[in-house]
Amino acid sequence: MRASTWNDPGYSTAGIWACLALLLPFSGAALAQDRASPLRIELNKIETAGENCRTYFLIDNQKGESWRSLKLDLFALDTDGVAARRLAVEVGPVPGRKTLIKLFDFPGLSCSRFGRVLLNDVMTCERAASSREECLSAVETSSKIDTVSFTK
């Protein structure tokens, strides 16, 4: 007895297309999970707070999953591009479908000397099925301040 093929009697082209159409929604869901929505972090505002420069970060997770913990390694570079301060900040928890604002002070640094904030690395990250490296690539940075950029 030989094996049947798709063009043998009993296997209609319409039947094959119907089976494929039934599987199509499942393949789209799998692709959507592989391309998780990014976590957008925007340097929204800076202001002087005594001897410090206070930074306001807008964390936009409107389309993403929850992050239990996200600790960032930040560097403030001065207007000459020289690393001026390093700061480790805990941004999490960040609920899914939520936007937050978090404030962090760069001690002993004047806001007028701020040229750029660098997201150097993700120190710790706790979210569903993600490594620390995957978390870094899932973060998108931007700045609302014309004179101070926020980059990776």
Image (spheres, rainbow, N blue to C red):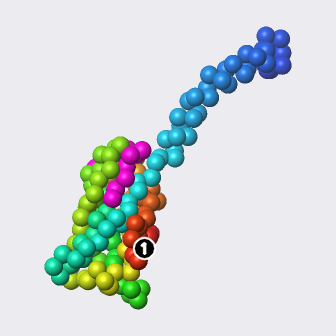
128 on left or right of 29: left
Q: Where is residue 89 in the image (x, y as percent from the top left)?
A: 26, 66
Identify the image quadrant of residue 56: bottom left
As drawn, 91 above or below 30: below
Q: Is mark 1 on a helix, strand or loop?
A: loop
Judge whether residue 60 can be spotted in this image: yes
Residue at image position (24%, 64%) is 103
Between 49 and 127, the one lying in front of the other is 49
Q: Identify the residue position indicated by label 1 in the image.
A: 146
Residue farthest along the top direction in this orientation: 10
Q: How crowded is mark 1: few (under 14 residues within 10 Å), some or many (20 or more)?
A: few
Figure quadrant of the N terminus: top right
Decide whether residue 131 is among the magenta residues. no
133 on left or right of 70: right
Between 74 and 44, the one lying in front of the other is 44
Residue at image position (73%, 20%) is 16
Residue at image position (28%, 80%) is 111
Tell me which segment is drawn in magenta. Answer: 58-69
Between 102 and 45, the one lying in front of the other is 45
Residue at image position (45%, 52%) is 38
Identify the image quadrant of residue 44: bottom left
Tell me which amino acid carries mark 1: Asp
Q: Position of residue 98 (x, y in %)?
A: 32, 46
As drawn, 21 above or below 33: above
62 on left or right of 4: left
Q: Where is residue 61 in the image (x, y as percent from the top left)?
A: 37, 49
Figure quadrant of the C terminus: bottom left
